[in-house]
């Protein structure tokens, strides 16, 4: 190890621990915590940590050199084996509604925050290890994470960032050298899996459930302290905390949440577990568990087998669930506002922002200059119907649509098959393309060509605009699973390759097409990990 290497670029400033009340108990035992926002607890050392990969962009955010990231010291620190002097590790206390039911205290059961750093630009980031051992909030679980779920969290955090979706980030992925027992589908088939730790990075990991738990405990003093802290640190532009500012802050949370959900719908991301403890107060995508990507466009799809019955968290339901979650947050804030009417009014920011932003996004996805009201609404709604009627790969469909020639003098001179040709590769089952369906998509395409011609956009102009919002490469479920299979055998090449391809999801990367711009293969249709995931991680 290079003895000179140090983390001296990291400028620690642990405001959360400094400004908010701590659990007075410091032993690492299970307990109900009151009057506090966190418990001090150290990561559990691991046997033999080794680095699988790291994100160079996140390292750059933290002013870390390549040499440092590739050093033993880095692996020691981000496996939790070495706690730097300035770190003050802690687990956060929060509660939440799980699948619609109040679950009481949850907390960081396996996440340990190392501390906050200010980078050279003055931006604040919390460093958090996920899978670093038990905490006072571990309940009956082991505090650990396995490689399978850690690869998924590591890759997806970074992929989402590069897609332009607000998200927590991932600095590193390390193997612990230990094995962890998991029963993936809770069906009596446990197996030993490699243990792993991801270092997550975000301005803050505070959740809706952080406020909910304090409200449920009727601890209004601590609730106010937490709200004031969040406003001072993450929403300083709103001014000095007080009743009016609380409302403006809540509106901002509604606005950010709406924007985040619009992004999810745009790229076809399904979170899978939108419990209120998995909702970031900053409007970031947080807690990558049994998430998935829409392959064929199916609004009823959920990747989470634990949710297979009610499908509460299915793709098409995400916008309503976010609203439901915001209502729970509003309920938690009632004691501070002492009146429900203004909170109800503020809540309306969510549907208003969502609708507006979604219409604009859909116009962008179709390459229209702007959303033009009723007619565009029908054009979009009709497309949604067609997309779900036959199995159509959502990602491929929009990229192919960008290639449609709309600069035709006379669209009626083009045959149905001629129009449809460019879309052909987006369909999963050719036999589903009945004459009726072909007629319907054909007439939709003709309407679309007319609409684009009304805008006067050239093919090039429109394709460039569309390709900036419709990704060509997403973390397809089966690709993540193939990377995991290889990684579990000790070959991390595909993890790194995917990290790399997904850095530029909107670019053509022609040499990557045959491998990554492909529909889900048939073998992946019903394979565990590819279309079915559980909360076990
Ligand atoms: P999730 O559904 O993954 O967001 O987790 C819900 C709660 O369970 C959170 O409080 C997690 O910290 C906790 N949890 C999940 N897995 C584990 C684990 N292996 N060990 C301890 N706590 C866990
Ligand atoms: Mg969670």
Image (cartoon, rainbow, N blue to C red):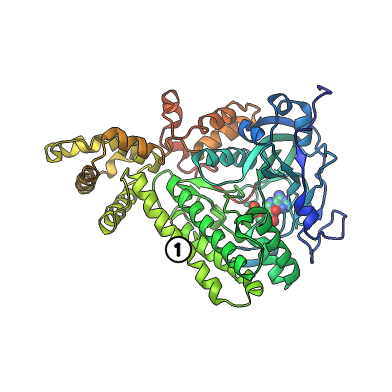
Q: Residues within 10 Å of mark 1 (few under 14, many from 20)?
A: some
Where does residue 68 sit, x and y in percent of width and height?
73, 27
Q: How many marks?
A: 1
The relative height of residue 34 versus residue 430 in the rendered view (above or below) is below
| Mark 1 CB lies closer than 8 A to ligand 2 | no
Residue in view at x 83 percent, y 60 percent: 23
Q: Quadrant of the N terminus?
A: top right
Please identify the quarter of the rendering in which residue 513 is found.
Answer: top left
Residue in view at x 31 percent, y 55 percent: 381
Where does residue 413 sit, x and y in percent of width and height?
11, 37
Asked if residue 532 can be seen in this view, the reply is no
The relative height of residue 174 versus residue 23 in the rendered view (above or below) is above
| Residue annotated with mark 1 | 351
Please identify the quarter of the rendering in which residue 462 is found.
Answer: top left
Where does residue 417 sit, x and y in percent of width and height?
19, 37
Asked if residue 69 can be seen in this view, the reply is yes
Residue in view at x 72 percent, y 57 percent: 107
Secondary structure of the residue carrying numbered label 1: helix
Please identify the quarter of the rendering in which residue 87 is found.
Answer: top right
| 185 vs 35, nearest the viewer | 35
The relative height of residue 291 versus residue 35 in the rendered view (above or below) is above
108 lies left or right of 347 = right
441 lies left or right of 496 = left
Where does residue 339 sit, x and y in percent of width and height?
59, 78
Residue in view at x 41 percent, y 59 percent: 355
């Amino acid at each position: 190890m290079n003895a000179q290497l140090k983390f001296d670029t990291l400028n620690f400033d642990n405001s959360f621990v400094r400004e908010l009340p701590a659990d007075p108990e410091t032993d690492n035992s299970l307990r109900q915590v009151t009057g506090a926002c966190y418990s001090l607890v150290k990561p559990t050392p691991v046997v033999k940590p080794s680095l699988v990969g790291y994100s160079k962009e996140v390292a750059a955010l933290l002013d870390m050199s390549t040499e440092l990231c590739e050093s033993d010291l880095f692996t020691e620190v981000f496996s939790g084996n070495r706690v730097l002097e300035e770190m003050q590790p802690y687990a956060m206390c929060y509660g939440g509604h799980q699948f619609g039911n109040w679950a009481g205290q949850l907390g960081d059961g396996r996440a340990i925050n190392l501390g906050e750093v200010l980078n050279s630009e003055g931006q604040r980031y919390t460093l958090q290890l996920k899978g670093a051992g038990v905490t006072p909030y571990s309940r009956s679980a082991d505090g650990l994470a396995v490689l399978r779920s850690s690869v998924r969290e590591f890759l997806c955090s970074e992929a989402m960032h590069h897609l332009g979706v607000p998200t927590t980030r991932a600095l590193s992925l390390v193997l612990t050298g230990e094995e962890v027992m998991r029963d993936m589908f809770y069906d009596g088939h446990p197996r030993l899996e490699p243990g792993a730790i991801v270092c997550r990075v975000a301005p803050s990991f505070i959740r809706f459930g952080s406020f909910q738990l304090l409200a449920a405990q009727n601890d209004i003093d601590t609730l106010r302290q937490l709200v004031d802290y969040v406003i001072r640190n993450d929403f300083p532009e709103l001014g000095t905390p007080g009743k009016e500012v609380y409302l403006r802050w809540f509106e901002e949370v509604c606005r950010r949440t709406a924007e985040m959900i619009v992004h999810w719908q745009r790229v076809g991301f399904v979170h899978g577990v939108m419990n209120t403890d998995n909702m970031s107060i900053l409007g970031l995508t947080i807690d990558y568990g049994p998430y998935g990507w829409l392959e064929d466009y199916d609004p009823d799809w959920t990747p989470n087998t634990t949710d297979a019955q009610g499908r509460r968290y299915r793709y098409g339901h995400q916008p309503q669930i976010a609203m439901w979650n915001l209502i729970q947050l509003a309920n938690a804030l009632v004691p501070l506002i002492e009146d429900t009417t203004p909170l109800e009014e503020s809540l309306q920011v969510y549907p208003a922002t969502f609708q507006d932003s979604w219409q604009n996004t859909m116009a962008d996805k179709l390459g229209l200059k702007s959303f033009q009201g009723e007619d565009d609404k029908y054009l979009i709604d009709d497309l949604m119907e067609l997309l779900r009627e036959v199995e159509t790969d959502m990602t491929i469909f929009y990229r192919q649509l960008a290639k449609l020639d709309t600069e035709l003098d006379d669209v009626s001179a083009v045959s149905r098959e001629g129009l449809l040709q460019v879309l052909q590769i987006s369909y999963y089952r050719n036999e589903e393309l009945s004459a009726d369906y072909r007629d319907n998509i054909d007439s939709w395409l003709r309407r679309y060509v007319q609409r684009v011609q009304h805008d006067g956009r050239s093919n090039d102009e429109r394709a460039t605009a569309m390709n900036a919002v419709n990704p060509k490469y997403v973390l397809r479920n089966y690709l993540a699973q193939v990377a995991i299979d290889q990684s579990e055998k000790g070959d991390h090449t595909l993890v790194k390759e995917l990290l790399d391809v997904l850095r530029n999801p909107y670019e053509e990367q022609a040499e990557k097409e045959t491998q990554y711009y492909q529909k889900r293969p048939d073998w992946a249709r019903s394979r565990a990990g590819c279309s079915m995931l559980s909360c076990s991680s």
